[in-house]
Each structure stands twice: as structure tokens, then as C-alpha cells.
Image: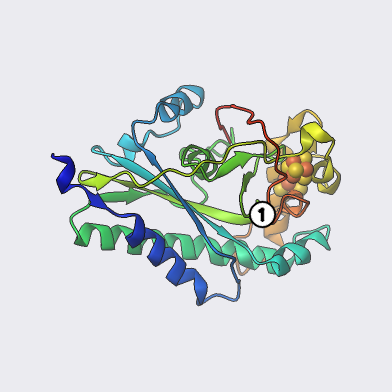
Amino acid sequence: MHTASLVDISDTITDLIMDRTRAPATRTRYRAPLVGFAPADDPRFDELCALVPDHLHPRELLPDARVVCAFYLPFSSHTVTANACEERVSEHWARAYVETNALLSELCITLVAELERIGIPAAWAPPTHNFDPVRLVSAWSHKSIGVICGLGQLGHHHMLITESGCAGRLGSIVLGTGTKLPPRRNADGSFCAFDRGCRVCIQRCPVGALTESGLDRSRCYARCLENDARFPQWTADVCGRCATGPCALQPMHHSKSSGEIPVV
Ligand code: SF4
Ligand code: SF4
């Protein structure tokens, strides 16, 4: 295919996401979404698959994958404050989790249909519950994809910290033949202040799952399941208290990047 025939899908995707989150049909409110792109042949996808053997490569979602797009929907500061004030997950945060997962799925379905309408094949993976229930590792880690697409970096709490913080949710889609790679985002510098002494996420973890040495996934997930039992009307296996600290709404900027391969 000649370069001249490639389609720039950046505006189509960004406009649709902006439009759906500006006045959403949810009680949850959002700050401005972030959208990032990466070529499907970025070697970090291969590295990710080597580090996490069950993780899918973009080509396993779409055989002729050309571009990967990740997007982040940041919760309003009100949602963050509500969860920071309760040791158990707040109803507000649980609702935001449930509503945003549904919104992300709806966005992906709409984006794929819209792109296919203009001749671009596309595919997506669900925003959550796509992980191995024993090892608690995702087959398609939106957080890792978000790092590769330049949306941000992983913090000590294993959340993605973006230019709009870590309190929000992520989705991603894979685009096929005919897609032109949009300009790439650059999330340089260290967004987490752990190396500068910040321990807020550790202090806020109610069950000791987050420590100086890292995250105990099993303990964290057990807490999420306990929280889920509180909301029989939803699938709300979520906690998020560690995402209500100083990096919730913005990064803790520093000049050096960790350079780590993102695995979550
Ligand atoms: S609370 Fe502090 S240490 Fe924890 S992820 Fe955020 S910036 Fe890093
Ligand atoms: S999500 Fe909750 S249980 Fe898990 S590490 Fe964060 S604060 Fe701890």
C-alpha cells in the first residue's frame, strides 16, 4: 500500500471519545480524555509478550495490525475525594468503575464500527476481566498498552499515571491496514515520586497489599472481591484507595524516566 492512501484516523477517534465523555449518559463525570497511539510493530509489544507469555500481541487481536490506540478516561476530582474518604471502596468509585467499563466497551464497539465504515479494520479487548484468575495477569494489559502508546508511566501502586493522574480507566483498540500512524505522545520523566520519598499509596492501602517492595496481587484482589460483595447490583471488584493520593489527578513530575518495560 502507498503512503498516500493511508487514512489519518486520529481526529475520528479523538473526536468520538471527547464527544461521548463530555456529556455521558452516566452519573460518573470525567475530565478531558487522553488518547495515544503506537505502531503495532513497536518492539515493546514483543518484549511484553516475552515477559508475560499469555499476553496477546496486537497481531493476535488483528492479523494485519498497523496501529494501536489507547485512551484514558480520567474521573472527576469528586470521585477521587469520595474514595479517599472511605476505607472501603466508596459507592461513588464503585459506580464509576462499573459505568466506565460499560462506557469503554460501548466506545470500542462504536469506534470499531465507525472505522470499519471508512474501510479500516479494527479490533478491541474488553476493558476488564480479561486476566488469568490464578496468576492475576492480564492477557491484554491496557495499562501496559497505555505506556507503549505514550499515555504515561506505571507508579509504585502499579496504576498508570498519566498527565491527568491515575484515577480513571483505560481502553484500547487495534487498527489494521490503511491506517496512518498519528503523532506520538511523549510521557517522559518520572511521574511517580516513590524515589523522592512519597509513600501515600502504601499508607492508603487498607490491607497491606502495597508495601515498599511492591504489590501483593493476591491480597489486593481479595480486597477487591470483598468490596464486590458489598454491591450485589454490580460487578464492582475494585478498591482504588491507592489511586487517590498526590498522583490521582496529575503526575508527580521529575526529569528522568525509569525506562522499565511496562508489565501489569
Ligand atoms: S502515591 Fe506517591 S509513591 Fe504512590 S504511586 Fe503515587 S506518586 Fe508514586
Ligand atoms: S487497589 Fe486497594 S487493596 Fe489493592 S493495592 Fe490499591 S489500596 Fe491496596
Q: For residue 26, which quarter of the picture? A: bottom right
Q: Tell me residue 94's x, y (percent).
A: 66, 63
Q: What's the residue at 45%, 28% (across, down)?
A: 44
Q: What's the residue at 50%, 77% (across, down)?
A: 25
Q: How is the image coloured?
A: rainbow
Frontmost residue, 82 versus 185: 185
Q: Tell me residue 233's x, y (percent).
A: 61, 70
Query: Quick check: 181 above or below 41?
Result: below
Outermost residue toward the front? Answer: 255
Res 162 seen here: yes
Q: Tell me residue 175's x, y (percent).
A: 30, 47
Query: Quick check: 2 above or below 9?
Result: above
Q: Tell me residue 132's x, y (percent).
A: 53, 37
Instruction: Identify residue for label 1.
Output: 238
CB of mark 1 near ligand 2 (< 8 Å): yes
Which amino acid, mark 1? Answer: Val
Query: Quick check: 242 above or below 59?
Result: below
Q: Is 67 on the left or on the right of 85, as rendered?
A: left
Q: What's the residue at 52%, 49% (across, down)?
A: 129
Q: For residue 217, which quarter of the picture? A: top right
Mark 1 Cα shell of 10 Å, populated few (<14), some (14-19), many (≥20): many
Res 106 seen here: no
Quarter holding the C terminus?
Answer: top right
Q: What's the residue at 63%, 68% (across, down)?
A: 95
Quarter holding the N terminus?
Answer: top left
* Local SS, label 1: loop
Q: Is 72 on the left or on the right of 76, as rendered?
A: left
Tally of numbered tags: 1
